[in-house]
Amino acid sequence: MDRRNLLPIGQFSQASGLSVTALRHYDACGVLVPTFVDPVSGYRYFQRDQVRTAQSIRALRQLDIPVEEVRRLLSGDEAELVAAVREHLRAAERRLDVQRSVVHSLLSRLTEGAEMTHRVTVRPGVAERILVRAASVDNAGLEAFLRGSYREMYEVAGRGPLTFAGPAFVRFHGVCDDENETLVEACLPFWTKGAQPTDLPEGMTVRELPESTLACTEVEGAAAGFPQILGAYDTVANWIAEHGFAFAGPVRMIYRRWTGIPDDPNTRMEIAWPIDEPTDSP
């Protein structure tokens, strides 16, 4: 074989900026396969025009793009690769915005105390009959799920027509963020003595919520957007724990005034957590 157009793995490593160990790994994964492998020594050789490909692999991996995704992107056309890199940049910018907000929120809580911005009150929660649409989602899918669910529920309510008995709310059965998905219920309360819903679409149900006691705080404007609103959840949870109450059900996010934009100055949300009376038992 004419090896004049080939680079041994050591030289190729220097040219590409990928270590010899990384090159062997990408060979095993099928991401960057050497042109020739010496059958006696097992030494790998790469074509000179593979240097650019190797440099692209290095950059994509520096962006934390998984190896399998790198292989898929490199097997496609350049336009797809460009689009993927631009989307990755937008996602990274969104993560940075979230991280910046979390840092500012944490610093504020550490230096000023959560009670400076969130006041917790206790109020009764009335028994309610509600339309419910549920799904397991993470934060990335939350907005689309809620918009679609409420659009469908308001269509059902309009056929009744149902009489609304209070603001719409969401029940979270666990942590819903960028790393975790949980069961989320979009809820729409309606009057029990008026018209009742019929011909519910698949996945929509009617449920009865009993009376309860709720520990609550309200947020407005930018504080109602993600991730700033997490500070309100934390404040209520801390208050419940510090005052000896028991957590008695999924936390609710209630739309007290909704403009359609989470951080709109006119948006007002209430975080309400069902609680039980304090107990002396361990």
Image (cartoon, rainbow, N blue to C red):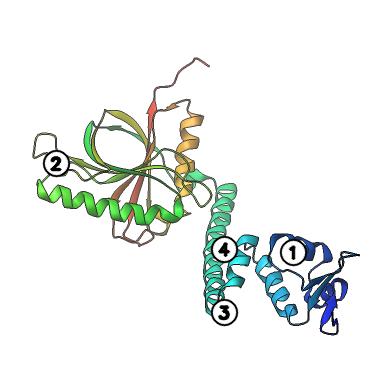
Q: Amino acid at mark 3?
A: Glu
Which disc, if any, is residue 197?
2
Query: Looking at the image, is mark 4 or mark 2 earlier in the sequence?
Result: 4
How dense is the environment of label 3, judged by Cα within 10 Å: few (below 14), some, or many (20 and up)?
few
The local secondary structure at tag 4 comes to helix
User: From what the image shows, is residue 112 above or below residue 278?
Assistant: below
Whole-number angstrom distance, CA of label 2 to CA of label 1: 60 Å
Query: Looking at the image, is mark 2 or mark 3 earlier in the sequence?
Result: 3
Where is the N terminus found, in terms of image quarters? bottom right
Q: Amino acid at mark 2?
A: Pro
Q: Amino acid at mark 4?
A: Leu
Q: Is residue 167 left or right of residue 263?
A: left
Q: Which residue is mark 1?
A: 27
The local secondary structure at tag 2 comes to loop
Q: Which residue is mark 4?
A: 96
Q: From where the camera sits, is residue 257 visible?
A: no
How dense is the environment of label 2, judged by Cα within 10 Å: few (below 14), some, or many (20 and up)?
some
Q: Amino acid at mark 1?
A: Asp
Residue 92 in the image: x percent, y percent? 56, 65
Q: Which residue is mark 3?
A: 78
> Which of 77/91 is in front?
77
Nearer to us of marks 3 and 4 is 3
Q: Residue at x 56, y 60 (%)?
A: 100
Q: From where the camera sits, is residue 234 visible?
A: yes
**Label 4 with label 1: CB-CB less than 8 Å:** no
Q: Residue at x 14, y 41 (%)?
A: 197
User: From what the image shows, is residue 115 above or below residue 15?
Assistant: above
